[in-house]
């Protein structure tokens, strides 16, 4: 009755994919696999995460419904009958107004992305039209629909049964023409922790992008359930989590331990659950502290071996994020941003002529917050494969003492003022254990086409400008 194997073909509307379904029949009737996630994903269907199944039964030939663009994705098929299906791209962008139409029977199915207007006309009595959607319908959601008139002259759909003879609701007859339609806006990106060191860099990276929203703790507290309940997640496709508890030594105290686990683990798990429930991409920033520093170079697939509470809480958050189908974990080390950081501290000491003692047996590379922001944007916009990516500055690994010496030299102060000491000599009561080696392998993110900045050039520019670049 149908093709021997599942097939798919693209259409002129981006993301609109038509499937041919194998239908097997005999004297008793027929059977088909109407929905097969793995097989259909292999043929171009996104992993859109359906949560609700609806059926529209249409008693009479000529019943016509649409054109409705809804704020979710749909997978449409027929249980009985035939239709003339019509789709119009009503999303903001260069393909706005583009049209595709096709006849469908139980042997076809079609994936309709969010914002693509959908309509159909039944060609047989007793047509059952069924569709999976990836958000739960609610009356409030109708405010986000975009409608187009079935008889729009610019679109010019060739309805097999003239609309004046068709069964059409009064509401569908009164929808606006294409020239009066406000295109459906793209889903947005939500940056959390937008007032912190990385958050400020992300504000700069996405400055002028109207599709990105920024929320500091006052607008969205990742530890507060009310923040999640008050957010309309249908508006978003991506969460970038720049919120974290970063007090490495403070995490070793009783109060700090509670805060570290609350923010870095429990709250991140709540974000991960939200991403799964709403089919969102979750971007999360990790740390070299999830490792004990015994490996010569840390790859993305290395098992976590955190030494202290901070590293343990970050590793727990990473594990939660890794369970999200669409996730990017961006692992960094020795972050330099707007605010207090090692480089600014050393520059301040150099200006005062101080001769500090600096640890020389911890190795790694600096990571400028602006480079993390640029790397995050690259992964999202290039649709890089989901997973974990190391991201630091490039160049030869250095010790903290060598970086301090370079800061002094760039500030015009004798680098010989820096005294190199060991971690054990520097250790103080209550200080968290540090990984001895924080060097992260960068080959994976380089393979996506992103080139991390060279540490020396970034440090020089940073010091000369006095601002985060």
Image (cartoon, rainbow, N blue to C red):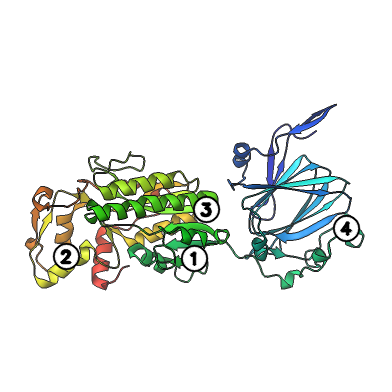
Q: On the rendered structure, is 260 left or right of 240?
A: left
The residues bearing labels 1 and 2 have C-alpha atoms spaced at a distance of 35 Å
Q: How many marks?
A: 4
Identify the residue under disc 3. 280
Residue 272: which numbered mark, if any?
Answer: none
Crowding at dot 2, Cα within 10 Å, few <14 / some 14-19 / many 20+, comes out as: many
Of helix, strand and loop, which one carries label 1?
A: strand
Distance CA(mark 4)–CA(mark 3): 38 Å
Q: 10 Å neighbourhood of mark 1: few (<14), some, or many (≥20)?
A: some
The residue singled out by tag 2 in the image is: 346
**Which element carries disc 2, helix, strand or loop?**
helix
Which mark is in front, 2 or 4?
4
Q: Is residue 345 left or right of residue 382?
A: left
The CA span between labels 3 and 1 is 14 Å
Quarter-wise, where is residue 107 in the image? top right
Residue 61 left/right relative to 447: right
Dot 3: what SS? loop
Q: Position of residue 143 (x, y in %)?
A: 66, 66
Q: Is residue 241 above or below residue 41?
A: below
Q: Which residue is mark 4?
A: 167
Callout in the foreground (1, 4): 4
């Amino acid at each position: 009755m149908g093709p021997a194997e599942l097939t798919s073909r693209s259409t002129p509307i981006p993301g609109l994919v038509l499937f041919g379904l194998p239908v097997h029949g005999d004297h008793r009737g027929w059977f088909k696999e109407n929905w097969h996630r793995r097989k259909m994903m292999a043929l171009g269907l996104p992993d859109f995460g359906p949560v609700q199944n609806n059926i529209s039964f249409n008693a009479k030939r000529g019943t016509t419904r649409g054109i409705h663009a809804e704020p979710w994705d749909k997978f449409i098929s027929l249980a009985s009958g035939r239709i003339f299906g019509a789709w119009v791209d009503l999303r903001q962008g260069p393909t706005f107004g583009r049209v595709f139409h096709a006849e469908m029977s139980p042997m076809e199915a079609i994936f309709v992305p969010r914002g693509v207007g959908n309509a159909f006309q039944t060609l047989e009595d007793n047509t059952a039209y069924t569709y999976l959607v990836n958000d739960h319908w609610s009356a409030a959601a109708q405010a986000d629909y975009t409608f187009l008139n079935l008889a729009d002259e610019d679109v010019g759909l060739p309805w097999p049964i003239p609309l004046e003879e068709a069964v059409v609701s009064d509401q569908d007859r009164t929808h606006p023409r294409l020239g009066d339609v406000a295109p459906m806006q793209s889903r947005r990106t939500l940056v959390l922790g937008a007032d912190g060191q990385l958050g400020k860099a992300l504000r700069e990276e996405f400055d002028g992008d109207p599709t990105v929203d920024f929320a500091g703790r006052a607008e969205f507290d990742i530890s507060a359930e009310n923040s999640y309940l008050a957010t309309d997640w249908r508006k978003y496709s991506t969460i970038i989590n720049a919120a974290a508890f970063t007090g490495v030594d403070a995490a070793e105290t009783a109060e700090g331990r509670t805060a570290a686990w609350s923010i870095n683990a429990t709250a991140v798990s709540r974000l991960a659950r939200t991403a799964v429930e709403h089919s969102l991409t979750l971007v999360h920033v990790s740390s070299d502290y999830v490792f004990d520093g015994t490996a010569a170079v840390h790859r993305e697939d290395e098992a976590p071996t955190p030494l202290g509470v901070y590293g343990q809480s970050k590793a727990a958050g990473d594990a939660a994020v890794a369970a999200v189908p669409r996730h990017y974990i961006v692992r960094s080390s020795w972050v330099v941003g707007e605010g207090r950081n090692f480089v600014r501290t050393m520059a301040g000491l150099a200006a005062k002529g101080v001769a500090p003692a600096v640890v020389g047996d911890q190795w790694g590379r600096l990571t400028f917050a602006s480079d993390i922001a640029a790397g995050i944007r690259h992964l999202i916009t290039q649709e890089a494969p989901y997973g974990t990516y190391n991201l630091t500055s490039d160049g030869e690994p250095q010790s903290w003492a060598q970086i301090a010496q370079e800061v002094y030299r760039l500030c015009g102060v004798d680098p010989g003022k820096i005294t190199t000491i060991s971690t054990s000599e520097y250790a103080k009561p209550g200080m968290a254990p540090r990984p001895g080696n924080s060097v992260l392998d960068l080959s994976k993110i380089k393979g996506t086409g992103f080139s991390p900045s060279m540490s020396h050039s970034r440090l020089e520019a940073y010091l000369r400008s006095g601002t985060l670049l």
